[in-house]
Amino acid sequence: MTTSLIVANWKLNNAVPEALMLVAGIEAHMKESPNVEVVVAPPFTALYSVGVALSDGTIKLAAQNIFWEEKGAFTGEVSGTLLKDVGCSYVIIGHSERRKYFGETNETVNKRIFAALRNGLVPIMCIGETLEEREGGHTFDVLEKQLKNGLATLQIKDLEHFAIAYEPVWAIGTGRNATSEQIAEAHHFIRNLIAKLYDAPTANGISILYGGSVKPSNAKEIFAQPNVNGLLVGGASLDAKGFCDIIAQSPGQR
Ligand code: PGA
């Protein structure tokens, strides 16, 4: 049984007290399983406290972004060294909100991936098309460009511990998740392209997650799609019980 990876993206939510309550709630409701890896991504300000709270358990810590330099005169930035220092083992890179609001490009995504790998952090690289791109028939061109440029000059060994999250922009925070067919098609395309760019074992070793309006009521069907190795959950991860209901739908738990 391959392990499912389920990542809670808290976005800009939860000060330290709420963050600690939420992880305590997840730990209380979650049925542990060696076949499921659960990761939470609090805002930077709560990473340390949540990391301490999680240190005896199995839930892992992720940051929502990483800067590509290690140190120096870069006001407002956070490096991989600092993320490791507070206990992170994963980092979300290139989320569509960063692409849309903060000028993230495929080139900066690539630099951030290198910074993550240098620091032993597993990158969760986000890709996905906008509604306009989908309706214009450009979905696969967009995904191909995001993947090729985001992964530029990475070697096979760099992809040994790596996750890609397919998140159609129009499905994020809208309550409208992609259909099973759309998910299966996109995940197949991603796996195939990695196999072409690298090789089949590398493609099969990468976790491909789906994200975009995942909730307890649709998680089971999404997990059942071929090439879905996990989920990136936003809004529904802010409620401990709901998030654990999603975890309980994973093939590793059923
Ligand atoms: P959502 O967000 O689950 O609230 O749609 C997913 C994400 O942005 O990662």
Image (tube, rainbow, N blue to C red):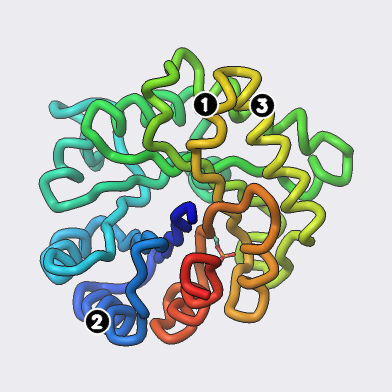
Q: Position of residue 223 (x, y in %)?
A: 62, 63
Spatial CA distance of label 1 from label 2 is 35 Å
Tell me the quarter of the picture where residue 72 sits. top left
Residue behind mark 3: 193
Residue 24: which disc? 2
Residue behind mark 1: 150
Q: Position of residue 30 (x, y in %)?
A: 36, 80
At label 2, the amino acid type is Ala
Q: Count residues near mark 2 (Cα–Cα under 10 Å), then give few for <14, some for 14-19, many for 20+.
A: some
| Left or right relative to 10: residue 66 | left
Spatial CA distance of label 1 from label 3 is 13 Å
| Circle nearer the N terminus (1, 3) | 1
Tell me the quarter of the picture where residue 93 sits. top left
Secondary structure, mark 1, is: helix
Contact check, label 3 and label 2, Cβ < 8 Å: no
Which tag is nearer the camera, tag 1 or tag 2? Answer: 2
Which tag is nearer the camera, tag 3 or tag 2? Answer: 3
Spatial CA distance of label 3 from label 2 is 39 Å
| Left or right relative to 19: residue 203 | right
